[in-house]
Image: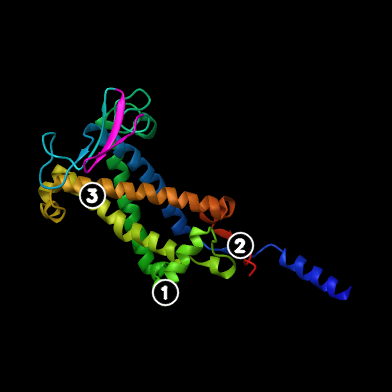
Amino acid sequence: MATHYADSEAERASDVASPLIYRTKLPVRIWHWINAWSIFVMLMSGMMIFNAHPRLYWGQYGANPDHPWLVIGHRGTSGFLSVGGLEIATTGFLGYAQGAAYAFPPMVTIPTTYSLADARQWHFAFAWVLLISATLFMAYNLLSGHLRRDLALKREERSIAHLWHDIKEHAQLRFPTGEAARAYNPLQKIAYLGVLFGLIPVVILTGCTMSPTLNAAFPLLAELFGGRPSARSIHFLCATGFALFIVVHLLAVVLAGPFNELRSIITGWYRLPKERSK
């Protein structure tokens, strides 16, 4: 009986709620939400801009007679996506959807009715928001030590074995628990570093390359990306990368526990998940 009583006490102790910790600092939370809104608006307005010429090219020139590597179009009421000559039917999703013969349907664009001028205004306005917020956040990262302390991969995390183990754990939906959940895991760090030092700088620079004014003032940009059509293609691929990042990020939030994750990014407070039983 005494042993059974002790076991029950241990079980009840293990059921006590895990500690609530302050995990996400205010500058990180502010940048997260500014960045999220900026990216969403830029993606949606960018899709409307793409609708004006739904073809992508590589090289110095790009026009209808040239050979695009990507086309989103329609034949009558049949939409299609063509990538490198491989054509995929996309009726009802891309090319022709909601009765509209546009590459991207009105439900995902800003504005929802065709207007290249309005879409550009939305796009450029939030491009400035993204540029300013990213610059300030990078300054915070460097000055506060957030980059070195929280985002840089530790020595043991850089090993192939460690990364492969982390990938397998995530594939099995086994997310970090206990003290391991106090910090970002290696895959999170790689994803965030990729956005900070990859997607954001490249999408800003390729956007500048497509601007006739900036292109004239800084011709080196066009040379850097192999021409304005190539810059537009890279810009589109970066936007696709942002969209995939958002999908994976939201899926991870839902699977890891949306209430706890949202509380962390809104208030900063996060409840450590209980240690997984061996």
> Which residue is tagged 2?
273
Please check the rendered image and state whether residue 88 is part of the magenta-colored stretch, yes or no: yes
Disc ID at residue 234: 3
Q: Which residues are magenta?
A: 77-91
Please check the rendered image and state whether residue 212 is part of the magenta-colored stretch, yes or no: no
| Observer able to see residue 212 | yes
Disc ID at residue 124: none
> Which residue is tagged 1?
154
Work out whether residue 247 or residue 160 is closer to the camera in this orientation and state it: 160
From the top left corner, tell me how far across and down residue 172 is, in percent: 52, 59
Secondary structure type for disc 2: loop
Q: Considering only order in the chain, which callout, 2 or 3, is on the residue closer to the N terminus?
A: 3
Density class for disc 2 (Cα within 10 Å; few <14, some 14-19, many ≥20) is many
From the top left corner, tell me how far across and down residue 118 is, in percent: 28, 32
Q: Is residue 30 left or right of residue 257?
A: left
Q: Are marks 3 and 1 in contact (CB under 8 Å)?
A: no
